[in-house]
Image (cartoon, helix red, strand yellow):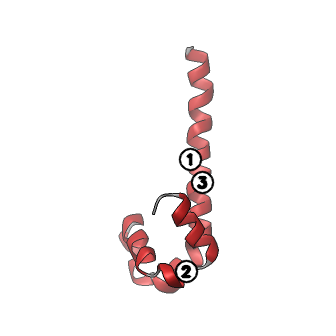
Amino acid sequence: MTRFLLAVVPLVLLASSASAQQGRDACSRDASRFCRPHLGEGDQAVLACLKEHRARLGKACQQTLSDNGQ
């Protein structure tokens, strides 16, 4: 059981990191366009800004937000 956990946990963490990176990639252009003043304030501030501008975001960013329950 311990071997299983040691093998699976890193894979789950890696998948989470990859998903987060894809979300950043999908929204980076929109974030720099609409949320430039908030980029230094952390992810939550940028996320709030992206939500405010949802109607103007690219399809990939809108899909990423939807896929992540935002």
Q: Is residue 39 visible?
A: no
Residue 52 as seen in the image, left or right of residue 16: left
> SS class of the residue under badge 2?
loop
Dot 3 and dot 1 residues touching (CB under 8 Å): yes
Dot 2 and dot 1 residues touching (CB under 8 Å): no
Image location of residue 32, percent across then percent down? 52, 81
Report the residue at 55% width, 15% height from top: 2
Q: Which residue is mark 3?
A: 19
Q: Give, as a three-letter code, the residue at label 3.
A: Ser
CA distance for labels 3 and 1: 5 Å
Report the residue at 40% width, 79% height from top: 52
Q: Give, as a three-letter code, the residue at label 1.
A: Ser
Report the residue at 59% width, 79% height from top: 29
Query: 24 or 64: which is nearer to us?
Result: 64
Q: Earlier in the sequence, mark 2 or mark 1?
A: 1
Q: Give, as a three-letter code, the residue at label 2.
A: Leu
Q: Which residue is mark 1?
A: 16
Q: Which residue is mark 2?
A: 57
